Image (spheres, rainbow, N blue to C red):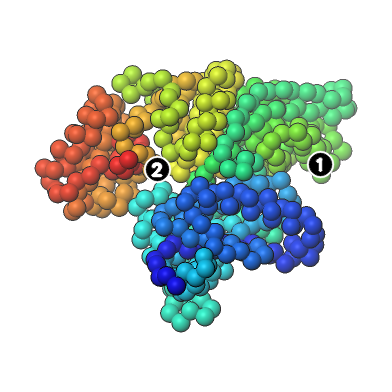
Amino acid sequence: MKRKIAAIFAADIAGYSRLIAEDEEETLRRLASYRAVMDDFIARAGGRIFNTAGDAVLAEFSSAVEAVRCAIDIQESLRTRNLAYPPSRQMSFRIGITVGDVVERDGDLLGDGVNIAARLESIAPIGGVCISRTVYEQVANKLSVQFADIGEQQVKNIPTPVHAYKFEMRPDDTRGDKSSLKAPAWLWPAAAAAAVAVLIVAGLALYRAGARSNAPVAASQSGGQAVPAVADTGPQPPRSPRQQEALNPDTIPFLPDRARAAVRSEYLPAADHKAIAISTGPFGYITGQADDETAKTAALDVCEKRTENQQPPRKCEIYAVGNTVVYTRGHPPLPPLPWVTHDPSTERPLAVKDIPLLRDPGKATIERNYLPARTPKALAIGPLGGFYTIVRQETTDEAVRRVLELCGSTAGVPCMVIAVDNNFVVPAPTIMRATGFFRPASAAAIAPEQRETVARRLGNASGWTAVAAGAEGRAGLALQAPSEQAAIDGALADCNKQDRTCRVIAIGPFAVEAK
């Protein structure tokens, strides 16, 4: 027997017995499909599955960071796949992770590390991740994910309480057996088995059925979206309800500008009873119905007919009844304006190998599908590397707005446009490796009393920027540098004047580490 320290990953399906009882063959078929996705993520993250039993999976990783990143990737990919099924038939995993001492025997692992991971899994949110404090301390400054501290947890057969932290996808996306389901937008932003993004080619197609006088009138937009290879998150509160909000075509999410114009010119002045249904691809509206319920059913039917042959599957939801918004998910989170700033000193042709945060399969997808696609187009990424592309839009502004809406909706946090057409529009580091978005207000490497100053100085700085931090948390900055290397050198020199053991923690908008 061999002892070692390992990061232990435990996963189990919530409500598996109920799913089996309701439809055994279909559940087993989907389990095999979902397990293929999970196994692939684990292998690509350097993990090893050492035990399985029914719907449970136990794996080991040499790195807690890779274990957590893998868990988030899996949950995002499987969450997106679940959107093709009604809420009662969704198959959602809970995942628990700890770092502990284990004993290896004939390839299997035994010991407290395995037991604690299994107990953390049992208290993890459906579709979420629960980690021990030992894991949290290792990943807190390395992943752009916010875990919620849930304190000491007394778990079965473990005499000492376990201090735990949890990470949840948006509550409306991880309900398991609850009654409603959110449609994806990324990607956020269904994934392939490797859960890499696929191209979105979005356009507008309007159709009308029947005469204007008494027959229904409908419009629908065809489009697509990319699905992220990585989940991109942090704790994500429910979106604010929008009931009783007057319908404004200019704020309907996901729609092209021409579709918004059709709503303004044709739908708004039409008589009740009428409704609009939206998805992250097609949409539909209908007017002149007998009552509101009939209008809602018909609008959903228009929208869903347009989604039937689209991959990944889209879920249509009622956005407005009459001229009142009833959609409860609110607007996707967007970054502050301006969404794109063109700076000649950092803007350069898009080199796929240099796209920050993306893994090789995602880069291959962009090389194959995005680069040759027709402009205007845009590419957005989330803090953990999920990405969205949108092409063949009417204007550049429309491409930027729509890709941020799609990406932000699935990510649950604002995304970043890194390319417009075939040009980088942010300083993309190549000397150092990007690990996420840099947020100075919460950067653990910077002393709290310095964070506001760093954020203010970065502000609207142009050119290449870099931030370095020392052992005492003092920060050094380089602003308006002519190159990435000059920014690195400048930030280190500024930091070394005030602190020791300085290292660069950010370049441009990205948190970085040495390659």
Tell me the SS state at disc 2.
strand
Q: Which of 339 and 504 is in front in this view?
A: 504
Observer able to see residue 35: yes
**Is 228 above or below relative to 263?**
below
Q: Which of 177 and 339 is in front in this view?
A: 177
Residue to which mark 1 is pinned: 297
Determine which quarter of the picture holds residue 497: top left
Determine which quarter of the picture holds residue 488: top left
Callout 1 amino acid: Thr
Q: Which of 223 and 157 is in front in this view?
A: 157
Q: Nearer the viewer, mark 2 or mark 1?
A: 2
Tell me the SS state at disc 1.
helix
Residue 305 is situated, as x and y percent measured from the top left of the image, at 79, 34
Determine which quarter of the picture holds residue 282: top right
Q: Which mark is residue 436?
A: 2
Residue 418 is situated, as x and y percent measured from the top left of the image, at 44, 30
Residue at left 45%, top 35%? 416
**Is 130 above or below relative to 206?**
below
Q: Is residue 76 left or right of residue 217?
A: left
**Is 340 above or below relative to 81?**
above
Residue at left 30%, top 21%? 345
Quadrant the C terminus occupies: top left
Q: In this view, does 74 lie to the left or right of 177?
A: left
Residue at left 37%, top 30%? 428
Callout 2 amino acid: Gly
Q: Distance between the residues labelled 2 and 1?
A: 42 Å
